[in-house]
Image (cartoon, rainbow, N blue to C red):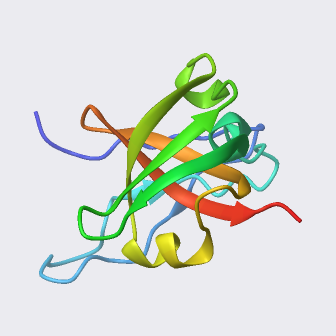
Amino acid sequence: MKGAVAVASSGQPAKPAMGMSGMSGTSDMTKVNDVNSPAPKMDMKGMEMSSGEVKKIDKQAQKITLKHGPIKNLDMPGMTMVFKVADPSLLDKVKAGDTVKFTAEDQGGAMVVTAIEAVK
């Protein structure tokens, strides 16, 4: 069986959608336009910056060694480790010895720094 399903919420009837190109006749497609629905919640843990110290920068390999505190979004304790960088220009913002704030993500098993800034 093929066809569209009409859905209504908040006691309001569903409103018909505009016709789709390539379809003949009137469209029986409908959509819900419920402005009372809450916006989806964002996971802010992924946005939280972690603290660390730059130990080494390898611009050719596009890697940075950080001695860091806990990285909450990765559920990782503090340690010293090598990260790839999402953008090689991030390495121009810091130097060995700098105290930094950074964000890191697990991208296919590789730990990647996606943002970094020196703390003054």
Q: Position of residue 47 (x, y in %)?
A: 68, 47
Displayed quadrant of residue 88: bottom left
Residue that extends furthest to the bottom in the rendered view of this protein = 21
- Residue plotted at (63% across, 21% down): 78
Q: Where is residue 40 shown, x and y percent of the image?
A: 68, 43
3 or 34, nearer to the observer:
34
Residue 20: quadrant of the picture: bottom left
The N terminus is located in which quarter? Answer: top left
Q: Residue furthest right?
A: 120
Residue 100 position, x and y percent, is 72, 54
- The residue positioned 74% from the left and 48% from the top of the image is 39
In this view, 100 is above or below 53? below
* Residue at 45 percent of width and 68 percent of height: 17
Q: Residue at x 76, y 37 (%)?
A: 11
Nearest the viewer among 1 and 114 is 114
The relative height of residue 81 versus residue 79 in the rendered view (above or below) is below
Say if 89 sits above or below 13 in the image: below
Quarter of the image where the C terminus is located: bottom right
* Residue 77 point in image, percent of width and height: 61, 16
